[in-house]
Amino acid sequence: MAINPQAPQSETAGPSDDAQAERRRAEAARARAEALGETLPGLLIAAERVAATVAQGLHGRRRTGTGETFWQYRPFEAHDPASAVDWRRSARSDSLYVRETEWEAAQSVWLWADPSPSMRYRSKPTLPDKRERAQILLLSTAALLLRAGERVALLGAEDRPAMGRHALERLVERLLAAEARDGDGADLPAAERLPRHAHVLLFGDFLSEPEAVERRVAQFAALGVGGALVQVLDPAEESLPFTGRTRFLGLEAEGEMTVGRAEALRPAYAERLADHREALRGIARAAGWTFFLHHTDRPAEEALLTLYMALAQERPRQSGAAAAFG
């Protein structure tokens, strides 16, 4: 086992050792925060540029919510509060009914970008790494949502969804603060209890076991939360273009593997990747979610436009933030 030369070597540490270790951790976190903070203006500019490219044509859609214009009556459901019952309409039948109005208030959207070590990969210096692209997609999606009058928040930040320019700036700050504080994080978001009819957009490579992704998506879906999985991959992860003797290094403690002819792995690799992606599509489909794929050698605008067009065409069975795109 490698020993960190800065760590105390004795089996027990005194108060002064604990204080020094805590100071070192604080200084390291502050240095990371300062370095990441320098990227905040660039992230904001890039995200808003991408959002502005696809913002044209945004229009409203009739959907249920808390406005004043009558939309429809529907049967009372177990999750509805008693105050939602329209007693005048219910008195004319043996069932309880809820009066729904046309959607006028903003819906809530939670966003998350994969902070795990595998997201730091890029096959060429001219390409962005996957983490940078996921963050740009997250922020440009948020900017587009905010233009449409939606409320957004970062999943795991414990903030209430907010609107307006300040909401985007706070989103960037929370995103960078979490990265500075936690460094490399988990490859899936923590389970959170979100409001029914909320929406979750997850950006990551989703190269973990499909069973883990399925559990997390199912937890959100069980709450009545809609969502989308946006898989971000480097083009080399798609095509495995390597030839000859190649050493593969795992970014998440998987170890390393050296092969004599990397091209010989290509057919089996392609089949396994296709199976994995189909499993992700099935997970999203079963939950009523949507799955998207984006490669980092393609423009971010293209990914956001694809996301926008697909969600704009959805006709969700219940009100939700996906409707904001149409």
Image (cartoon, grey):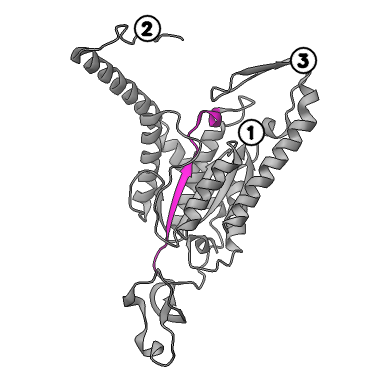
Kindly identify which numbered label has been placed on residue 234.
1
What residue would you read off at disc 3?
260
Q: Quadrant of the C terminus?
A: bottom right
Q: Which mark is residue 5?
A: 2
Task: Identify the residue at image location x=80%, y=32%.
Answer: 267
Say whether disc 2 or disc 3 marks the residue closer to the N-terminus.
2
Q: Is residue 155 visible?
A: yes
Q: Are marks 2 and 3 in contact (CB under 8 Å)?
A: no
Left or right, 294 with reference to 27 = right
At horizontal 43% and vertical 77% (from top left) the residue drawn is 76
What number is the disc on residue 203?
none
Percent of width and height locating residue 250: 59, 22
Where is 173 relative to 248, above or below? below
Dot in front, 1 or 3: 3
Numbered range of the magenta stretch:
105-120
Amino acid type at mark 3: Gly
Mark 1 falls on what kind of element?
A: loop
